[in-house]
Image (cartoon, rainbow, N blue to C red):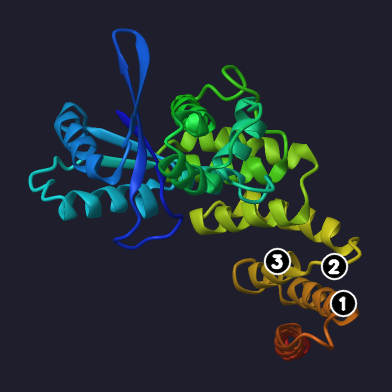
Amino acid sequence: MLFLDLETTGLGGGAGNVAFMMGLGYFEAEGYVVRQFLIRHPAEERAMLAELEALLPRFRWLATYNGRSFDWPLVQTRLILNGLGRSLPELLHLDFLHPSRSLWKNTLASCRLSHVEEERLGIFRQDDVPGSMAPTLYFRYLAEEDPSVLEGVFRHNEQDMVTLACLGIRFGRLLAGEAGSAFPMPDAGEELLRTGLWLERMGEPREAERMYGRIAASGAAPDVLHGLAMRDKKAGNWERAVVLWQLAAARGADRALPDWRSHVELAMYFEHRAKDSLAALELAEEALGLASAHPLQRRDARRRAELEELRRRRDRLLRKAGAASDREAEA
């Protein structure tokens, strides 16, 4: 696996954006090697890219952070513009930004690499030069020809390379079932749910179920309970889905901004699967009452549409329950 991180002359795309520093990391002889390339002027770019091109055949995997959208397309563009890269190996790309977002986008304030490393890896940088400052410092270096200007950029890039390896180890251990032993088990319901969903997508259903099993016992918020119930509905696990919806409905009704989604799901379950129209009607009426009491329902067009849909559901169930009562009376 080859870890890659670039420092560039700009933060956007386009053919004018050049990588002036390239960090590469890989494991070799029981150690982790970090190599950093700096082009002292734009004419050295081709030599740096040639070094990368020669190194790539040694590896099967490429690991980056947001590299699928930024770093690797930029490398490919610069290789073409420099007449290189005609026979690059087809590396399998692991962009760690995507699993980071899958696990933590709702529990961390940001999924920037520097924030993820603090909150989930316990790595704290001292006097770090932010990546957004790198272009300014490089142009200052070109003007002043003073390499000390770039010291902070070198340190920032080196730390990125170390963090990438640590993040790869973290995800590998999570997939290997080592949550709770190699690193702390998630304790927030939202993170447990998102971790379980990610593990399931990665083909680890047993580990996913271990996360799901902790959610109901964690005092999770209605949103989390509802999210797991919807996953169970899709998987056909109706028994647990109903229990989770009932918990979510009870907790959601007590919030300052009530949540009635679980009431609606339960109403559909009792109407179509349990064939209990009266229970479905009771839940639909509760959902309608909660929606009507929502402080934003008159101002928000989407809320008004939801309210009208709940009224139609309630009225349909009233007719259904009435028809059932008539049949019982005739019998």
Q: Residue furthest top?
A: 30
Quadrant that contains the N terminus: top left
The spot of residue 215 in percent (x, y) is 70, 41
* Quarter of the image where one finds residue 60: top left
Going from N to C along the chain, the mark reached first, 3 or 2, is: 2
Disc 1 vs disc 3: Cβ atoms closer than 8 Å?
Answer: no
Look at 84% across and 80% down and name the residue there: 296
In-image side of 243 versus 96 (left or right):
right
Please give the label number shown on residue 294: 1
The residue that appears at 16% across and 53% down in the rendered structure is: 80
Residues at marks 1 and 3, CA–CA distance in whole angstroms: 20 Å
Residue identified by numbered label 2: 258
Gap between marks 3 and 2 measured at Cα: 16 Å
Residue 140 horizontal/vertical position (percent): 48, 44
User: Are the residues tagged 2 and 1 within 8 Å (C-beta)?
Assistant: yes
Q: Is residue 174 visible?
A: no
- What secondary structure is found at the residue carrying circle 2? loop
> What residue is disc 3 on?
266
What's under tag 2, amino acid-wise? Pro
**148 or 175: nearer the viewer:** 148
Who is closer to the viewer here, 281 or 229?
Answer: 229
Q: Residue at x 73, y 91 (%)?
A: 319
